[in-house]
Image (cartoon, grey):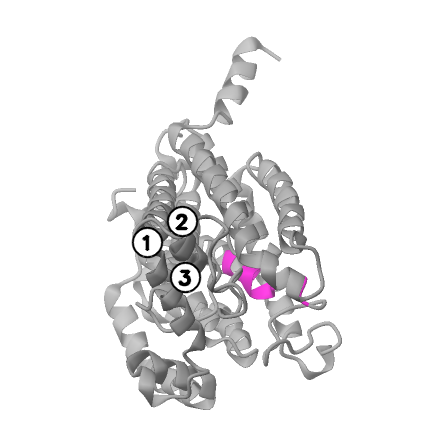
Amino acid sequence: MSTSTVVAARDRWRMGVEARGLVIVTAALMAFGLAILYSASAFVAMQAGRGSTHFLMRQLSGMAVGMVLFAIVAKVDAERWRSVAWWIMGGALAAMLCTVLPFTKAIAPEIHGSRRFLFGGSIQPSEFAKLAVIIWTAMLVVKKGEQMRRLTKGMLPFLVGVGSLALCAALEPDLSVAIYFMLLMGVVLYAGGARVGHFVFLGFLSIPVLWSEIQRLQYVLERLRGFTDASAVHQKVNLQLQESLIAVGSGGAFGVGFGQGRQQFGFLPLPYNDFVASNVGEEWGFVGLFVLVGLFALWGFLGFRIAQQARTPFQRLVAIGLTFALVSTAFLHIGVVIGLLPTTGLTLPFISYGRSNLLLSFLMTGMLVNIGSQRERVHGAFATDPLAAPAFAAQGA
């Protein structure tokens, strides 16, 4: 092998500035997250008869696996995901079906009133289904090219595929995840050239279905009522939000100090998971929440920069979808914690306890680092994918 070939191969995988920055920001979030998780979960673990580091050690084990996964994915050419997009989508749909079929209760038992996990809570299929939505939608957008401008041949196939995942999520029941699947699909479709008028038309058509589903799921209706009028529903509905606001309010500007928070002592349900940012607000104060928002905003900026410089349409769409998925989840979580949004079960990436979400976050970061590492510009980025050129020409891709 010639020296020039070796140098070219080395430069191909050299991380760009954005990819390096993404790794640094991710490392900062991981370190911050471990400290927050330990403080938020120690009392809960001891109350359950376990050691104070129980949740921390389980999170560390997930982090170790996640870092290995990150290292592998960061070296795999992101373009290869396009060839296995149908397999990924099929696997995600099969896993989601396991959570709703009546004869799969042995592997998907009901936990807290819904069947969202497999094997006793070890795997949450909806987390990995988010990745399937992004990769499969990006692949199909590139394949369809100019047909994306048409409703029947452009938009409807996506509604069938992603809609099947959303239906499974709604039956678990987990309406927020079902809506989030459709939102992810919409973001990738919009970035791929779909017409805004089609989104408006389909949005109007979905209103009766969505309202019917909200009325069927009583807990969703109560949460919405509780968000608009806290006095209109039973205190239990707003318990998490009320305790979260007490935590954030008592933190003030600089917080009460690491490990000095009081709300995790049995007052705030799930302080280490769905409401872990409450612990940040209480112990680190406004400054801590501001730093947290800043880190995720920087993560998003770097991710979108990588998307802007991606060398193929597929990689560009995947990078947009991955960045939006992680950052929007973080901001939605923080919005719920401070009372700006209705209560929903969204975790905080890299910080909340939960190994499914942790592995997904590492996987997403690895894919983005790979896209950001391939810095060479193929003469005409669309030369490798002529079918996609028309769909992106109008966007200056």
Does the rendering let one see residue 313? Answer: yes
Which residue is at the front of the view, 18 or 248?
248
Circle 3 crowding by C-alpha within 10 Å: few under 14, some 14–19, many from 20: many
Percent position of residue 157, x then y: 44, 68
Distance from Cα at disc 3 to Cα at disc 1? 24 Å
Is 226 on the left-hand or right-hand side of 373? left
Percent position of residue 361, x then y: 52, 50
- Give whichever of discs 1 and 2 has the lower sequence position: 1
Q: What residue type is labelled 3?
A: His
Q: What residue type is labelled 2?
A: Thr
Please, what secondary structure does the residue beneath circle 1 have?
helix
Please, what secondary structure does the residue beneath circle 3 have?
helix
Query: What secondary structure characterizes most of the magenta part?
Result: helix
Q: In this view, does 372 lie above or below 227?
A: above
- Give whichever of discs 3 and 1 has the lower sequence position: 1
Do residues under tags 3 and 2 come within 8 Å of each other at their CB atoms? no
**Quarter holding the N terminus?**
top right
Residue sitting at 40 percent across and 72 percent down?
Answer: 241
Q: Mark 2 points at which residue?
A: 323
Is 52 on the left-hand or right-hand side of 252? right
Q: Mark 1 points at which residue?
A: 191
Q: Which amino acid does label 1 sit on?
A: Ala
Please, what secondary structure does the residue beneath circle 2 have?
helix
Does the rendering let one see residue 343? Answer: no
